[in-house]
Image (tube, coloured by chain):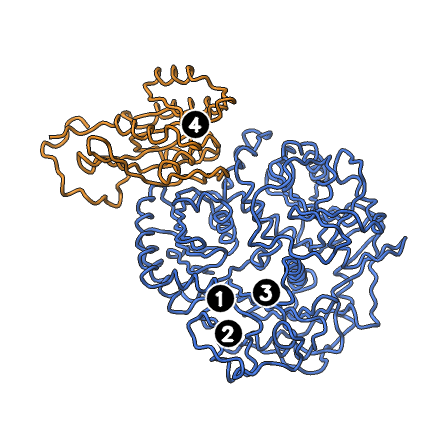
Amino acid sequence: MASDSNSSPSITDCTDQNPNPNEVTDHLTTLAITESENAIVDEVDSNQEDSVDIANGSLDVNYDQNDDTQVEEELPTGSVLVSAEVEVVEDVRERNSSGGVDNGIDNSEHEIDVRLSPSSSGYAGERGTSSATSNSGIEEVEEDGNVITLQDSSIDAVADSASWVPGKRHVDEDDASVSWRKRKKHFFVLSHSGKPIYSRYGDEHKLAGFSATLQAIISFVENGGDNVKFVRAGKHQVVFLVKGPIYLVCISCTEEPQEALKAQLELIYGQMLLILTKSVNRCFEKNPKFDMTPLLGGTDSVFSSLIHAFSWNPATFLHAYTCLPLAYPTRQAAGAVLQDVAESGVLFAILMCKHKVISLVGAQKASLHPDDMLLLANFVLSSESFRTSESFSPICLPRYNPMAFLYSYVHYLDVDTYLMLLTTSSDAFYHLKDCRIRIETVLVKSNVLSEVQRSMLDGGLHVEDLPIDPSLRSLSLSPHLGQERLTTDSLERFIEVDHGIGGPAGLWHFIYRSIYLDQYVSSEFSSPINSSRQQKRLYRAYQKVYASMHDGGTGPHKTQFRRDENYVILCWITQDFELYAAFDPLADKALAIKTCNRVCQWVRDLENEIFLLGSSPFSW
Amino acid sequence: MGCSSSLPDRTSRQLPGINSENAGATDSKNLKVKLVLLGDSGVGKSCIVLRFVRGQFDPTSKVTVGASFLSQTIALQDSTTVKFEIWDTAGQERYAALAPLYYRGAAVAVVVYDITSPESFNKAQYWVKELQKHGSPDIVMALVGNKADLQENRQVPVQDAIEYAEKNGMFFIETSAKTADNINQLFEEIAKRLPREPTS
């Protein structure tokens, strides 16, 4: 797969070529239209996907075109990223027009709700929230269940993904609980008759009234021949997704883009199909009042772990998967033995380590969608029973065939490494077990498993290792890839702007997504993005910029340079790849651009190790 | 297994073939049987198996997905061995329709309920009926009341279970995977009841 390696564009550093800066500002306005009257907007279900955020009278977008904020660059061609004079600040500040209270980015992470008397439907009383902004000592209920006081905003690292335990939290709550109403992000699944199916927090059965309210909103709009997609109520966004008899709703004050929340609902629906297939719809045809909760018994941890992934796993918005870095011959060895079994009637053979792919092979013409892989890996990783013994279970890959079950043989080869063999045949267990034994023998003999463990310890790409001199780049491979590592002194570092942390030119982190491979690689988090809280914030920033890059109404964009008080974020999309890079907020723009070029070159130099190339089952 | 071949074939069947799904004797002294555990979710099927196979007990509940496969060989006093190939099925409703996948061809079915839960006892009776209808005709069935350590919370009287088991020609035992009480006895008793080829 040489698609990434030849004739790829490069960013050049030159002066402003933006033909029409005014157009740029116009375009920005469309990003955040606000109106001041309605509280609810019903969006026509058509191709018009633009977000129309309507605040209930209290929000006003205030941006200045004069100073160096608020301009988004859109460049005529994707091949040249121009260093322009204008700089962009992503932070469209929301000002409370009546009180003039600045609800800037600091507050946007926090939900404050002092109303202690809940009304029948939990969100009815939300309109008054901004009155509470001065009350900064109030306790905030974090999504992961920990309670933090806002005064101590320096608290970091509540729970990082390593220590996070899947499972439902706060089952005792319902919509009458103050704590329940303070949660920043709710997900609900309900049936078209208003019966609760899943709720992220609280006991579904106690949320019947709340579910009925959601159902009423949806069907009220439907009765008018329309579809409700999105409602903004104060700080809260409510996103709806209707899938036949199943309704999915997200209520969030996390300021994530509406498109991102909708994509998350799609994944939750996909996860449900993976467990039940779409034939569950038939139950609703027979009996509209069908109660679906028993069918999902014992799957809380699957959903909670998926929802957790929405705040740390870039695969959830990139729609791509990531590989464990491995020396090319090692990955080849794994691929060869998987290929072997794929020819014996196995539909997909997938070898993974945690969320990263070691190798995967599909039978002829069978292609596996990255979202299916995400959902499958999430299902296996969040179901503890797979770790205790080998198992054989029906699962559905919604993008492959939402109507039918496949049968999956799952076996952990060590603590983190597991093999999944998927087949259409329900009595193939003993065959798959034999395949596994064969695969395991080869993997042990060819040291693949020990290489995998070594790679896990070494981690992936570190921004500090970004080579600076192109002539040296071929020598500067990561240490765990079996290559000779240069000593630090011989590897001249990029020190034009050195803040003492992160990589060259203030590079803190990057994600590179190869479009042809449907794979991405992201650098390891390093100083100063150490705590899980900071990582989540960066993740959200990427997610936001991803949504704006892919916004159907105003985009797609080729390049974007955003600066705010937390980061500089630089995005660059070509027909081969997408790059998202985060820099120190004080990073020099020209240097940042130069560094992005180096990152791309570096990734291409390492593609044999960081990507799964060739014999890809991702067919088009 | 009434009339088998007149010559006991001891050598040629040492290695199970790829499709060795059906239970059967590898030879007259070393049996290999397929065993399936059925029962409501949360009654402790996986705990019974893990206690039997690995001698472990993990109080944190881990919901089984689909079915897990484990095997364990026990030696009996008459110097024969029995290798159990155990299908530990998920108790969730969504897997009920798929149960035949796992009990098809099983020589033994262990139907488990929780002595503190009458619903789980009802569910056990459902499984017994299902096996009588669709299981192998000569299947050995055991009825197991698990969580016997929770005596003070008992809701299913021993007598009810004994009567039900007798009526349906089942072997009955109460176990505790937590304390390991009666776990080995359960499997030894099953082993004894397996139909055997006549030894020469």
Q: Nearer the viewer, mark 1 or mark 2?
A: 1
Amino acid type at circle 2 is: Arg
- Residue A133: give x, y in percent of width and height: 83, 51
Q: Secondary structure at mark 4?
A: strand
Amino acid type at circle 3 is: Phe
Q: Are marks 4 and 1 in contact (CB under 8 Å)?
A: no
Residue at the image position 50 percent from the left and 52 percent from the top: A372
For chain B, the rendered hue is orange
Q: Secondary structure at mark 1?
A: helix
The CA span between labels 4 and 3 is 48 Å
Q: Secondary structure at mark 3?
A: loop
Q: Are marks 2 and 4 in contact (CB under 8 Å)?
A: no
Residue positioned most to the right: A98
Q: Is residue A473 visible?
A: yes
Q: Which numbered disc covers residue A458?
A: 1
Q: Quadrant of residue B159?
A: top left
The CA span between labels 1 and 2 is 20 Å
Of residue A476 and residue A338, the one placed in the foreground of this image is A476
Callout 2: residue from which chain?
A
Q: Which chain is drawn using blue?
A: A
Q: Same chain for labels 2 and 3? Say yes or no.
A: yes
Check the picture and name the quadrant holding the N terminus of chain A.
Answer: bottom left
- Residue B143: give x, y in percent of width and height: 38, 24
| Mark 3 residue crowding within 10 angstroms, few (<14) / some (14–19) / many (20+) | many
Q: Which residue is mark 3?
A: A525
Q: Which residue is mark 2?
A: A604
Q: Same chain for labels 4 and 1? Say yes or no.
A: no
Q: Earlier in the sequence, mark 2 or mark 3?
A: 3
Q: Are marks 2 and 3 in contact (CB under 8 Å)?
A: no
Q: Which residue is mark 4?
A: B146
Q: Quadrant of residue B112?
A: top left
